């Protein structure tokens, strides 16, 4: 048997064993805690003491959608990490490092609610550390913090909501492509890309955007202790630098993650504490699960998922230049 056949046989054997082992794990979709993609080790970053300061990271677009490889969504992972913080009595403060342009309205609001619940249930301080970008939904999450640190060059703001609709009616007409919608009500095919948007339809979508926008304004008013009129003046969708945001009262101090962590310690009431992070725990089951998902995935590049998002409009708290 030549070398190529041996390699092919080895791959088949690995896939077969992976399938057997993964199936022995209880249904990965049934309970989040059993998902091989959600398992962490608690790594010490610095410090000492029985009390802990946890650093959590919000990186990339905030979404409730699983990845193309079937891994848990960002919101699932963060929600589970926040649950772990909530259930650990030794955690005395939380530092939330945000490097995100924002994302889905629902996923963002759910995470914000979890952060507020953590403060109410555990009474632990939350300090936000902004990275290079903490805009729109990223800022929405930041309003849950007791203090917000940023770099003078951080890109933040973009306070508002966007709802994109793709329309190719003119191109379809030129190509002779037509869609006939047999519908039960006047607005059942609202937003169809095969025809222009009508004025009543635009008003309906605008009302949805306005509702989400008002919620955004509410969390800024409450979280930053600003007047509603002042928030309405600055929440026009534009982006701000860290320098501008500080002048507007959107952030509190300039500083990096380390400085934000030291400030969290000062709020915790502890003289010293151990700074920890939750990092991915490498395990055989996780590796095998990833392999199985990759091999079983008909769309490894996520192209079809991207097209689905394009054709399924969503309300977004997201900076989209």
Image (tube, helix red, strand yellow):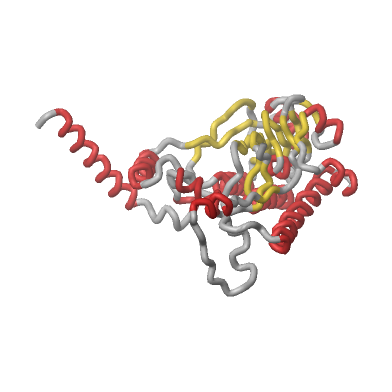
Quarter of the figure with residue 247? top right
Q: Evaluate whether residue 94 shows in this view.
A: yes
The structure residue drawn at horizontal position 73% and vertical position 36%, both measured from the top left corner, is 127
As drawn, which residue projects farthest toward the left?
1
> Quarter-wise, where is residue 237 in the image?
top right
Position of 32 compared to 286: left or right? right
Choose between 177 and 133: the one closer to the eye.
177
Give left or right: position of 177 versus 276.
Answer: left
Vertical comparison of 130 with 12: above or below: above
Q: Where, quadrant-wise, is the C terminus in this rendering?
A: top right
Look at the image and tell me whether residue 118 can be seen.
Answer: no
User: Can you give x and y, in whole percent of width and height, for residue 138 in the image?
Assistant: 68, 40
- Where 50 sits versus 151, above or below? below
Q: Quadrant of residue 291?
A: top left
Looking at the image, residue 46 sits to the left or right of residue 120; the answer is left
Q: Report the side of 303 relative to 190 (left or right).
A: left
């Amino acid at each position: 048997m030549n070398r190529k056949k041996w390699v092919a046989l080895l791959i088949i054997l690995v896939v077969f064993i992976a399938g057997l082992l993964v199936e022995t794990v209880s249904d990965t979709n049934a309970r989040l805690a059993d998902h091989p993609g959600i398992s962490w080790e608690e790594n010490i970053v610095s410090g000492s003491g029985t009390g802990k300061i946890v650093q959590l990271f919000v990186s990339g677009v905030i979404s409730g959608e699983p990845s193309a490889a079937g891994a848990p969504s960002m919101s699932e992972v963060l929600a589970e990490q926040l649950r772990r913080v909530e259930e650990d009595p030794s955690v005395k403060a939380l530092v939330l490092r945000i490097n995100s342009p924002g994302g889905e309205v629902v996923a963002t609001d759910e995470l914000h609610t979890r952060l507020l619940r953590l403060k109410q249930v555990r009474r632990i301080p939350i300090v936000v550390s902004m990275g290079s970008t903490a805009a729109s939904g990223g800022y929405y999450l930041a309003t849950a913090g007791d203090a917000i640190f940023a770099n003078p060059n951080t890109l933040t703001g973009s306070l508002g909501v966007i709802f994109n609709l793709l329309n190719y009616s003119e191109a379809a007409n030129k190509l002779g492509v037509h869609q006939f919608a047999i519908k039960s009500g006047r607005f059942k095919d609202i937003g169809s890309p095969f025809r222009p948007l009508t004025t009543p339809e635009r008003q309906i979508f605008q009302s949805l955007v306005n509702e989400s926008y008002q919620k955004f304004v509410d969390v800024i008013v409450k979280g930053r202790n600003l007047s509603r009129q002042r928030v309405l003046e600055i929440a026009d969708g534009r982006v701000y630098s860290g320098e501008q945001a500080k002048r507007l009262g959107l952030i509190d101090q300039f500083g990096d993650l380390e400085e934000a962590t030291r400030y969290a310690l000062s709020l915790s009431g502890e003289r010293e504490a151990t700074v920890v992070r939750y990092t991915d725990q490498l395990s055989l089951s996780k590796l095998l699960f990833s392999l199985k998902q990759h091999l079983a995935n008909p769309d490894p590049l996520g192209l079809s998922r991207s097209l689905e998002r394009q054709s399924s409009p969503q309300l977004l708290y997201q900076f989209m230049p």
